[in-house]
Image: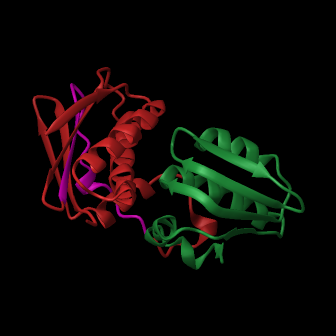
């Protein structure tokens, strides 16, 4: 179960488990959002490489438009996955 | 060792996650420990689903715990060989602009697992990983 709650002014909330079964729906929603985007990850319980791929694609799309994807409030386990991927050096993580 | 078979489709991940949660609790691990088991299984399972193109049968996952160490064994039947221990390394220092989707999953497995073994016998592919969990 994974949901993207769209709030105002480019703020979104990611909720649940962003795994391979949810990646396609997630990228479909994110492609429809203009940047910049700030994603509150406080309710993101789990992410795999498929989920990381979704966020990397979104970040690259926004970068091409001169904008950015910012991730906030990652729980330590989710943050570890970004570290395994080496993405903590490239993504904006608060 | 508990064994279950799952359809070779990513939609099986929800059922796998539920099973892992039950297994982790039954073996006295905190609920958060399921994260690492889920991630190891998902990356190996989806890898088989995506790349073992000749596979037609369900994929078998087996779980066992001995003390704090969990063993995960994933078996794909009647498929061509694909050895995850020999898959190309991903460079985590590669800049964002050069990254493509895919390739990260086995990198995670190698990074997280305490051991990773591959066996290919009679056209059956078996990956076994161990992971020491928090207790």
Looking at the rendered image, the quarter that the N terminus of chain A falls into is: top right
For image coordinates 77% across by 57% down, the residue present is A12
Q: Residue at x 61, y 44 (%)?
A: A2
Total label count?
0
- Of the 4 image quadrants, the one containing the C terminus of chain A is bottom right
From where the camera sits, is residue B124 visible? Answer: yes
Q: Is residue B13 magenta?
A: no
Q: Residue B132: give x, y in percent of width and height.
A: 22, 64
Closer-to-camera residue (A58/B83): A58
Q: Which chain is green?
A: A
Relative side of B14 to A34, left or right: left
Q: Judge whether A52 appears above or below B63 on screen.
A: below
Question: Was residue B84 drawn as part of the magenta stretch in this picture?
Answer: yes
Any part of residue A52 in sight: no
Horizontally, residue B35 falls left or right of residue A24, namely left
Q: Among all residues in the image, which is located at the extreme right?
A: A9
Residue furthest top in the image: B56
Rendered colour, chain B:
red
Q: Position of residue B119 (x, y in %)?
A: 13, 43
Residue B56: image location, x then y, percent? 32, 20
Q: Residue at x 33, y 59 (%)?
A: B30
From the viewer's perspective, is residue A69 above or below residue B29?
below
Instruction: Decide: is B25 above or below B126.
Output: below
Q: In the rendered view, how is the structure colored?
A: by chain
Quadrant housing residue B124: top left
Residue A53, percent across and down?
Answer: 57, 54
> On the rendered structure, is B15 left or right of A90?
left
At 37% across and 42% down in the image, what residue appears? B47
| Left/right of residue A17 with respect to residue A73 in the rendered view | left
Question: Which residue is at the front of the view, B113 or B17?
Answer: B17
| Residue range (magenta) | B69-91
């Amino acid at each position: 179960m994974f949901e993207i709650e769209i709030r105002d002014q480019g703020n979104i909330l990611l909720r649940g488990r962003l795994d391979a079964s949810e990646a396609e729906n997630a990228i479909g929603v994110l492609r429809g959002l203009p940047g910049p985007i700030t994603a509150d990850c406080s309710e993101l319980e789990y992410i795999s490489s498929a989920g990381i791929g979704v966020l990397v694609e979104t970040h690259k799309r926004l970068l091409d438009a001169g904008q950015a994807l910012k991730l906030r409030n990652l729980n330590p386990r989710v943050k570890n996955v970004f570290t395994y991927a080496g993405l903590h050096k490239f993504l904006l993580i608060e | 060792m508990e064994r279950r078979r799952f359809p070779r489709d990513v939609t099986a991940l929800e059922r796998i996650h539920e099973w892992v949660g039950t297994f982790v609790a039954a073996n006295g691990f905190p609920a958060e420990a399921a994260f690492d088991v889920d991630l190891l299984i998902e990356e190996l399972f989806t890898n088989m689903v995506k790349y073992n193109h000749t596979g037609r049968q369900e994929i078998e996952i087996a779980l066992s715990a001995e003390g704090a160490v969990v063993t995960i064994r994933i078996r794909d039947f009647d498929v061509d060989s694909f050895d995850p221990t020999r898959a190309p390394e991903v460079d985590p220092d590669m800049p964002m602009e050069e990254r493509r989707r895919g390739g990260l999953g086995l990198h995670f497995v190698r990074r997280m697992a305490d051991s990773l073994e591959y066996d290919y016998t009679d056209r059956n592919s078996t990956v076994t990983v161990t992971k020491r969990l928090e207790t």
